[in-house]
Amino acid sequence: MTEHFQTIVIGAGSGGMTVAIGLAGLGKQVALIEGKHVGGDCTNVGCVPSKTLIHLAKNFKPGMNADDLLREVTRKRDALREKETEEVKHIENLTFIEGMAQFTAPKRLRVTHPDGSSHELTADNIVIATGARPRMIDIPGLPAERTLTNESLFDLTCLPKHLVIVGAGIIALEMAFAFQKLGSQVTMFALDKRPMMTAIPEASEAIQNELERRRITTYYNATAQSFDESTRTLTIQQDEQLITLHNVDKVLVAIGRVRNLDSLGLEQAGVKVDPRLGILVNSYGETNVKGVYAIGDVTPTSAFTHSANAQGRRVVQRIAFPYLPLAKKEPLFPNATFSDPEVAAVGLTQKELAEYCHPQIIKRIRVDFKTHTDRGYTDGIENGFIIVDAVRLTGQILHATVVGPSASEIISFFTLAISQKISLYKIYRLVYPYPTFSSGILKVADFFMRDTLPNLGKELAAYLKYRFAKPSP
Amino acid sequence: MTEHFQTIVIGAGSGGMTVAIGLAGLGKQVALIEGKHVGGDCTNVGCVPSKTLIHLAKNFKPGMNADDLLREVTRKRDALREKETEEVKHIENLTFIEGMAQFTAPKRLRVTHPDGSSHELTADNIVIATGARPRMIDIPGLPAERTLTNESLFDLTCLPKHLVIVGAGIIALEMAFAFQKLGSQVTMFALDKRPMMTAIPEASEAIQNELERRRITTYYNATAQSFDESTRTLTIQQDEQLITLHNVDKVLVAIGRVRNLDSLGLEQAGVKVDPRLGILVNSYGETNVKGVYAIGDVTPTSAFTHSANAQGRRVVQRIAFPYLPLAKKEPLFPNATFSDPEVAAVGLTQKELAEYCHPQIIKRIRVDFKTHTDRGYTDGIENGFIIVDAVRLTGQILHATVVGPSASEIISFFTLAISQKISLYKIYRLVYPYPTFSSGILKVADFFMRDTLPNLGKELAAYLKYRFAKPSP
């Protein structure tokens, strides 16, 4: 028997749930297929347990039991998972199906259930939201029980005395700071040449300073060689040198993600996949096959829960209100890393800036919390700043990076300012509560004005000269 | 000998410093007169020491010494004071004068120096920025050495075991939470009927819940009766009942502020003063006397450092660039209280809303962090929310209050949105980093849309009917 739905969503992660619940709420008949856990990475092995851990670690005090804390993380995660699983089974117009889905035709899926049985489903629209899984490496000699990824990390019941982290990206850094606070000795190594390669170098520098201040040992341009279980020694290679790390309890591998596309049978649907970028979609998640959508980690868009949600919201709009015109541009996707200090950014990347703008048209403004804001002084912030790249003369903001306490909250001010094209002249006129970190935003505007107003002639000339000039190759 | 200046600023607090340093930087000859400490309340007895204390208290752990921490607050405060005092003496075009100033004519002042000598100064412009001091009450039997105000609080070298706080406003609440964290027993009483009377009742409720959760005892509608030093017992009266508070070490009086206007000789200058509101000024700080300005606590504007600074910046503009047109409106003044949770608000007050808007034109939206955001769940936030009052149908934001972590940072998003008239429709389209508290802003927009879109006809009718309707008296 073949069941038919208005929309089938494959994957009950945050992106898939946004589409399924959104469309069901609008009266569409929706099927939601999930092979593992409702809530996807975010609830189960991502944001929710990691932020719970980060929050508890921040308030961790001597005398507390770190193992209890790890169990509390698992408990909170499980409670939310159960709640979400129950909820998703009781939503009107939504049929929740456990199993693995595979295309047999563009609008047809075969679902294989946990008991081995299978059946076929058809739909007007199919949304691929199967996410990604951790990329693994093979370290000769390292036993599986010592190897962690974000998928097994939050089932830990016992704090590793010495945690080695492979990678220097978001997950690696968030966990490095959290486990250091809980009392683990933390060593990080990565093939990258600096931490957080996706951020501007100034952010990497701030993070590196804090890593060192907290005695987290780091090795860059480094690869794993082998592990000796008898002495629990991990050998890594940096440049030409071999380095040995002793008494290693666990190794967390956090070197990136692999898209979950292999078992989907995309070739049966004719959906185009780029081996590097994933499923190619437009700003409304539409693939090359009409009626087949993709969102979240399987697409080239930034691999954040909020990006998947935002894409999901747009797919809901596209499916439910197809007569509404397509917006020309993707929304701005801010990003945030919950390291300590936090790092958040929005707007053009440095690569995009270099590609689209002549360097002479950009004014970079840096405000350091410690020296330029009283809050940085009262709170003793050594490594924190706001960096803004703005168009000279006009004060239009192109990019902002915030490093420091509440950076992940402050960044939304810039998302609003950039998306609504609010210039630094207008931002200069606002009043910011004292003493906050956001009052640093006023300093950014101050510095821009101080640079611009006394030199209006020069600024205008430069603006006219470089506005449409091509950046040098 | 009479010295003449382009501008004389009376009071080296944050407002006065903004004007003096701003004008001196623009090449004007400025005199800055201060009778006490450079930096005014903010540096010496306000934001700087209080936020240092709040920050240290937040990270206070068992085994640390609270007395050391109090001395660290004093040390950091003194270091900043010394730095600011030194700096102010070495600014080009700025003459720093120690002494008390008194008008002898609209543009003429007599300054009495600490050694008793005096001399006269004249100026084209005089800016009054003398601030305010704590309002005192007399509690019969309470010795002076047990009485604290914000002016003596930050010289404490020893943690009070039992601290009684009179008042339930910003200073009272900030210090209640901070001293509780350091280990003091804290009791609060106030004539007010709830904490933080200037905030919306929902914020008071959240604060009250947290006070109770932290075992801070509170009495409202209560007044002090007497103190018995032999038993260190403070008797207060609540309604008809007498209540005794035992083993009281210190009593912090935080019941409001008195403007420093008495010794200024304002009548010699002819400057109009309202006994309740202070010196009356327009949005550029101009008093009724041409060339005489007033800013900060001596004016009716909200008594925050950032308000004084904002006024100061406008006075600088008015004096240095008098040909620039006057802006019609005052900027929006946000406010923030660094209690735990923080409380911040911007936009129309509830009184102004009731005065200008028919209740049917306003849609109030409340998003609770705990139930509506995942970050509230991971961080276990019991008392935190965003409340927005918006115009129905149009989604124009009139007021926002945020209670919770980073409220003082998140509020600037709303300052920007309100001042630039960015509606909830536009805010709905933004992407917010996950999992943050600011993603609650998206929920606000979601709730507005969910309420509005399916009922467009009804909403339009109500909008047309009530848009220009008078609120009932």
Image (tube, coloured by chain):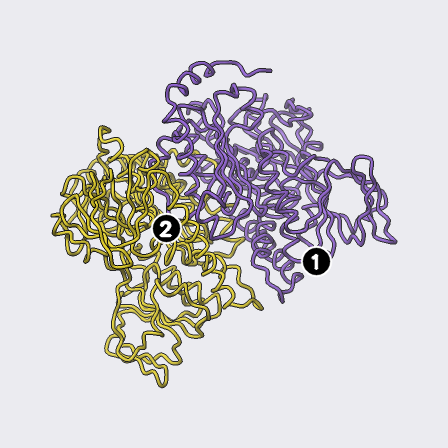
Chain colours: A purple, B yellow
Location of residue A351 by image quarter = top right
Q: Position of residue A217 (x, y in %)?
A: 71, 47
Look at 57% across and 42% down and name the residue there: A337
Same-chain status of marks 1 and 2 = no
Residue B217 falls in which quadrant of the image? Answer: bottom left
Looking at the rendered structure, the kind of residue marked 2 is Ala
Q: Is residue B5 visible?
A: yes
Q: Which residue is mark 2?
A: B344
Residue extending furthest toward the bottom: B230
What whole-number distance in Å separates the C-alpha atoms at marks 1 and 2?
38 Å
Q: Which residue is mark 1?
A: A159
Q: Chain under label 1?
A: A
Would you place residue A380 above or below residue B251 in this image?
above
User: Residue B193: where, in percent of width, then height?
Assistant: 27, 65
Does A341 sit left or right of B43 as displayed? right
User: Can the viewer see residue B307?
Assistant: no
Q: Amino acid at mark 1?
A: Leu
